[in-house]
Image (cartoon, coloured by chain):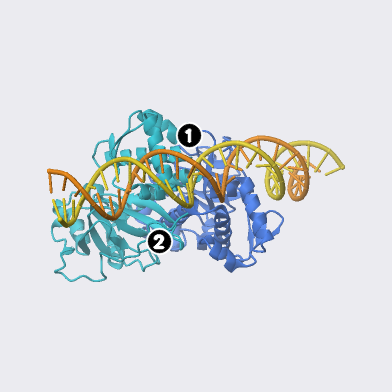
Chain colours: A cyan, B blue, C yellow, D orange
Amino acid sequence: MSARGIEPRRMGVPGAQPAHDPHCLPTAEACAVCEARPFSICAPLSTAELAELDRFSTTLHLPAGATFVHEGDPADHCFNITAGSAKIYKLLPDGRRQVIGFLFTGDFLGTATRGPYGISAEAMTPLSLCRFERTSFRAVLSRLPALEHALLDRTADELEAAREQMLLLGRKAARERVASFLLSLSRRAVRLGRVADPVQLPMGRTDIADYLGLTTETVSRVLTQLRTEGMIRLNGTSEVHLTRRAALESLCEGA
Amino acid sequence: MSARGIEPRRMGVPGAQPAHDPHCLPTAEACAVCEARPFSICAPLSTAELAELDRFSTTLHLPAGATFVHEGDPADHCFNITAGSAKIYKLLPDGRRQVIGFLFTGDFLGTATRGPYGISAEAMTPLSLCRFERTSFRAVLSRLPALEHALLDRTADELEAAREQMLLLGRKAARERVASFLLSLSRRAVRLGRVADPVQLPMGRTDIADYLGLTTETVSRVLTQLRTEGMIRLNGTSEVHLTRRAALESLCEGA
DNA sequence: CGAGATGTTGAAACTAGTCAATGTGCGTGG
DNA sequence: CCACGCACATTGACTAGTTTCAACATCTCG
């Protein structure tokens, strides 16, 4: 196991940003036109409640590659992704990395309520997000039961997904892992209102490998294998057509 | 990967149990003397709130081996473990099994809010639990913010643990997995007010293996290996002394 | 005390990992 | 606009760790 992918740079999100920083603007009426809202925890909030929450939020824009949450740091903020995609991951001291998940528009980050961040987060594309101070956010949470409900639902969903991933990591073979991954990306695209079939892979092979508990070589080999078998078709490295979707489905479950 | 451990028996917890069933008694004033309360989500509730919640709970007693939650069934109930231990797991159609976690006194089961159960649950020892109807529970949740808070905290903790396990399953070697497992059991024992050092293993090698994404043979081999190296001492098959705890700690992280 | 279940140990097989080379795409700068 | 160079992806040969299959040991409980 190699020590790839370790870049302890600390770009993006300085502690307190001055108002003139282009990466840190007050949200103002941004919520009114927010395209991420239908997919976010703010979806169930009324206009008044939205305003209440908005008072404590800050809009950030980060470049691709920016690490904006560092595992082990005090968990001072939580975030809502409004545009772009990010990955969250955990590291072992020797550099082995497990990608825990990928975040897209509408995803919330920072559920963990106590202690330091348990994960690191890095932008995979240029990223827009709403940032909340944890303390304020928790206070708002008490005042807005609808928000707490939404957050609980979402956290439960995340837990469910994590358990599914535990099954994948603990018991599935490489082919099954890759097939499961492609299908889950496809389903997620649908949930975000995009097409199911040409699946976009906004992440590189290394991230996929670290998400599936494999190596880039194995991911690559499996993809070509699936292509050879006619189950998928590759357009470049980051677009996959799921021909024979049913076959992929059964592959997920061990067929 | 073999199809061991598949017993689709359906004992315990029929849909609606008559009041005279010895396994299903009204809780009445049970909360007042409940030894699990300090470890449960009910801990932060006032006496009045406790009474409110109690109105919707039923006490169950199940024998070891009883499966009381079936993956895929409609999620009609949620549970609070008051005594004994249980395991939750997911299955693949061909019988491969991933144990998701072990539940002990005070643990809550049934966070997932929508759809069917995502996991199965089975008593490992004689088990006592409070059962709630999901619908009622959710309603109570709305009336008792303290309960919802506690549940959110707990779900977040579970998510954190699940992520840690993803790191283990995706990136740790067999020795590291076993060492991590022993230490996490030890820490959990401490949280439950028991001793840290002689760690009790209430589960068999098969469950351990299915939890760590290994086989029983590998678990067994690693344990003897650690014993040979003087890092642990085995008293029978279900008690482990963590001699050289520090060495185990560094082993967890890849030393 | 005996029998089935559970746990341990051994040898062989296999999946995925490692190391290394080659191929491909993309952005930059001439 | 094309060529260069770099990062990323693919492919190949070999290795290693874990699984598989099988035998044996131990424990538990009727």
- Which residue occupies the foreground of this view, D15 or B205? D15
Residue B68 drawn above or below residue B174: above
Tag 1: amino acid = Gly
Which residue carries the number 1 mark? A254
Query: Mark 2 and mark 1, same subunit?
Result: yes
Instruction: Determine whether, in the image, residue B224 is placed left or right of residue A131.
Output: right
Whether residue A112 is visible, yes or no, is yes
Instruction: Determine whether, in the image, residue A199 is placed left or right of residue B171.
Output: left
Dividing the picture into quadrants, the one containing residue A142 is bottom left
Which image quadrant: the N terminus of chain B?
Answer: top right
Q: Earlier in the sequence, mark 2 or mark 1?
A: 2
Residue A123 drawn above or below residue B134: below
Q: Residue B194: image x %, image y %?
A: 60, 65
Disc 2 versus disc 1: nearer the observer: 1
Q: Residue A141: image x %, image y %?
A: 30, 60
Residue at coordinates 30% horizontally, 67% vertically from top-left?
Answer: A135
- Which residue occupies the foreground of this view, A195 or D4? D4
Residue A22 drawn above or below residue B54: below
Which residue carries the number 2 mark? A118
Q: Residue A200: image x %, image y %?
A: 28, 41
Instruction: Determine whether, in the image, residue A78 is placed left or right of residue B248.
Output: left
Dividing the picture into quadrants, the one containing residue A242 is top left
Chain of the residue under the numbered disc 1 shown in the image: A
Find numbered disc 2 in the image and state the secondary structure of the residue it sits on. loop
Residue at coordinates 43% horizontally, 31% vertically from top-left?
Answer: A250
Residue at coordinates 65% horizontally, 66% vertically from top-left?
Answer: B243
Residues at badges 2 and 1 in contact (C-beta under 8 Å)?
no
Chain of the residue under the numbered disc 2 shown in the image: A
